[in-house]
Amino acid sequence: MQCNRRLRALSLAAAALVALPLVGCDSSSGGTIDIFQIARVVLRGPTGGVNSVEVTFTGDPNRTQAETISNFVLRGPTGTPIPLGRAHLLASERKVLLEPQAPFAIATNYRSIEIIGTGADAIRDTQGRLLDGDGDGAPGGNALLQYEFLTGAPLQFTDIDGDQVTIECQIAGHLDLLRSTGNQEHEFWIVDGTSNTIVTGGVTRSALGDGSVRISQIIGLDASDVRLLSNPAFIVRGAQVVAR
Ligand SMILES: [Ca+2]
Ligand SMILES: [Ca+2]
């Protein structure tokens, strides 16, 4: 019963789609400077049929450019673009919802998203500042986010700072993972899980690693028991699941 309560807590966290800290200010110069950047990108739908991509910004995007489809370029493993049907700004959430012309499979169709911050028609905020897509602290520059797709039972990988991670579904199902090659973000999907599925795993800290892996979302938790919380290698911090 205790485990069920833990599961419920984590499911609620996942349902809230795990708000990650935004990275929209730079205090390196001593003061706080607002910078208009990408906060996060997450996919919606099953790994075999993603039906939308959510791009969240650290500021308020101007609608005209934010709803210009050509400002968002999604590509597959060989560089083939994914045709988009619509870009819709949810202004109150600082989020653009990208809808492909047809649902796509991550494994075969998605490895990167480029968000345009260069040129007269590029993404701007409502103050007219260009997107700082390249993250150098100055307005302007495209953002290029690249990913690896992994699947397996168990799923084993080395994160960006060298920590060794093992995570798996026991009893039923397996995990798919979309992993950013540029940061610690990881999106997991439980595939073919049942109510008996148990998700468990661990992290071995490397010499230069921080011993943790940030999970930005796990899709499919509602049908699964999650022993991540009973494993001392994993803790829940706010709405995130963090493995230590
Ligand atoms: Ca820049
Ligand atoms: Ca790490």
Image (cartoon, rainbow, N blue to C red):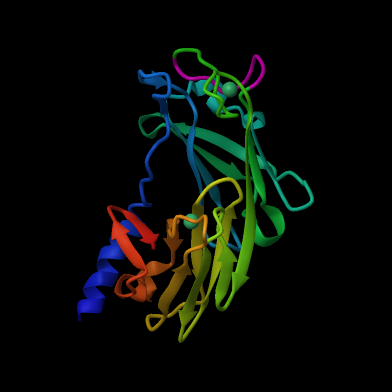
Q: Is residue 105 visible?
A: no
Task: Answer yes or no: is residue 220 visible.
Answer: yes
Which quarter of the rendering shows the C terminus?
bottom left
The kind of secondary structure the magenta stretch mainly shows is loop
Establish if 143 lies above or below 105. above
Is residue 105 found inside the magenta-colored segment of the image? no
The part of the chain drawn in magenta is 118-126
Q: Horizontal placement of 129 versus 14: left or right?
A: right
- Rendering quadrant holding ligand 1: top right
Q: Is residue 123 magenta?
A: yes
Residue 156 position within the rendered picture, expressed as x and y whole percent measured from the top left:
57, 71
Which residue is painted at 26% across and 68% down in the image? 8
Question: For residue 135, which quarter of the picture?
Answer: top right
* In the displayed structure image, the side of residue 102 where residue 166 appears, left or right: left
Rendering quarter of residue 87? top right
Within the image, what quadrant is residue 138 found in? top right
Which residue is pictured at 44% across the width and 74% down the height? 201
| Relative depth, front residue between 23 and 206 | 206
